[in-house]
């Protein structure tokens, strides 16, 4: 065998033995794992990136690497910090200049604590209320029933009160001209009623509370309330059909009342208010039929109508409110 044949056989054997070894080396290279710390510490020998991509598997237990700030980022951060410091310095200089101007002008800076939710201007809790008023009838075209009155309430909470009100009518009422013209033109009498006084037990509830500005200078506090109750009215029919023989005495009537009101505080103890109230009761009017004969006409049993009529006295009341005691203290939870 010649020397050339021996070289070919040797080369073939070397290739056969080297192929498995190269395959094992490639497989082990693909399964190699590196930690992120090792990757960060490793320095590339060549400036060019390798064409072959290698997968780097990081262990889950490895702590996150600390980020290093690049020189450019550090430079920009320092520039921002210096810019902020410059702005703060300018603001401080302006504040100092304003304080100097205030002192030169003799002005003082007002410092007052302002709360997002302010306290109620006037508390009603555990206070007494005295409310004188005047009343005007708005629904009776035949007789006007003005009156003067007063209410006295006790507020056992800041929104609930119980009290009484009193209205005096006698001597203030007057018959309208409409009633006279109706009688003269139709020869019919319109039955009317005279009031003496009314006394009622009332309950008041305040669901709304607020404030408003007037003339861009004054701020007023207000509240709106509903009220209702039961009481007595002392009334009598006015004889207009047969006044020659008939006359009536005052008598008590059971009356109910409901209403709405609004109150505007002038001070913490003084307020003005307006109310719209309806006093409803059952009234017996004068009988429109006149029996024949003097004896029958003088019989009181024939003077009144057989049935009662629901009567509504709708009034507008205007007045003042005084709260006692005049002052109060807030008791805040500790």
Image (tube, rainbow, N blue to C red):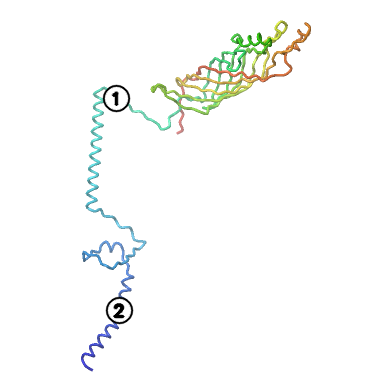
Which residue is more in the foreground, 208 or 142? 142
Q: Kindly state the secondary structure of the residue where label 2 is placed.
A: helix
The residue carrying pointer 2 sits among few (fewer than 14), some (14 to 19) or many (20 or more) residues within 10 Å by Cα, namely few
| Near-viewer residue (217 or 129) | 217
Q: Between residue 81 and residue 147, name the one nearer to us.
A: 147
Residue under circle 2? 21
Q: Is 219 on the left or on the right of 200, as rendered?
A: left
Q: In this view, does 317 lie above or below 299?
A: below
Dividing the image into 4 quarters, which one contains the C terminus?
top left
Where 264 falls versus 295 (above or below)? Answer: below
Tell me the residue at 73%/6% (across/down).
245
**Which numbered disc covers residue 240?**
none
What residue is pinned by disc 1?
Answer: 108
* Mark 1 surroundings: few (<14), some (14-19) or many (≥20) residues within 10 A: few
**On-image quarter of the N terminus:** bottom left
Residue 267 place in picture, x, y as percent: 45, 20
Q: Residue 107, position in %: x, y?
A: 28, 23
Quadrant housing residue 295: top right
| Residue furthest out toward the front | 185
Residue 32's quadrant in the figure? bottom left
Q: First in sequence: mark 2 or mark 1?
A: 2
């Amino acid at each position: 065998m010649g020397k050339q044949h021996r070289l070919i056989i040797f080369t073939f054997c070397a290739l056969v033995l080297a192929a498995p070894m190269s395959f094992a080396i490639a497989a082990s290279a693909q399964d190699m794992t590196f930690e992120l710390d090792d990757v960060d510490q490793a320095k590339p020998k060549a400036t060019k990136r390798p064409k072959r991509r290698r997968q780097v598997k990081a262990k889950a237990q490895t702590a996150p690497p600390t980020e290093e700030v690049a020189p450019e980022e550090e430079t920009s951060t320092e520039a921002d910090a210096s810019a902020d410091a410059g702005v703060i310095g300018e603001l401080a200089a302006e504040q100092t200049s304003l304080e100097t101007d205030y002192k030169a002008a003799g002005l003082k800076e007002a410092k007052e604590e302002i709360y997002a939710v302010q306290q109620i201007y006037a508390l009603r809790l555990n206070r007494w209320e005295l409310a004188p008023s005047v009343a005007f009838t708005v629904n009776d075209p035949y007789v006007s029933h003005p009156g003067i009155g007063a209410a006295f309430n006790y507020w056992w909470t800041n929104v609930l009160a119980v009290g009484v009100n009193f209205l005096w009518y006698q001597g203030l009422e007057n018959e309208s001209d409409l009633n006279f013209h109706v009688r003269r033109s139709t020869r019919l009498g319109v039955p009317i009623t005279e009031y003496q006084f009314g006394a009622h037990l009332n309950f008041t509830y305040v669901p709304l509370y607020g404030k408003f500005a007037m003339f861009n200078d004054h701020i007023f506090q207000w509240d709106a309330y509903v009220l209702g109750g039961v009481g007595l009215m002392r009334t009598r029919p006015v004889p207009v059909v047969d006044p020659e023989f008939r006359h009536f005495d005052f008598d008590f009537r059971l009356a109910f009342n409901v209403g709405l009101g609004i109150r505007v505080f002038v001070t913490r103890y003084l307020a003005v208010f307006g109310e719209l109230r309806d006093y409803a009761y059952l009234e017996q009017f004068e009988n429109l039929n006149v029996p024949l004969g003097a004896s029958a006409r003088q019989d009181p049993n024939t003077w009144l109508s057989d049935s009662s009529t629901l009567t509504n006295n709708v009034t507008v009341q205007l007045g003042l409110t005084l709260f006692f005691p005049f002052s109060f203290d807030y008791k805040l939870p500790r």
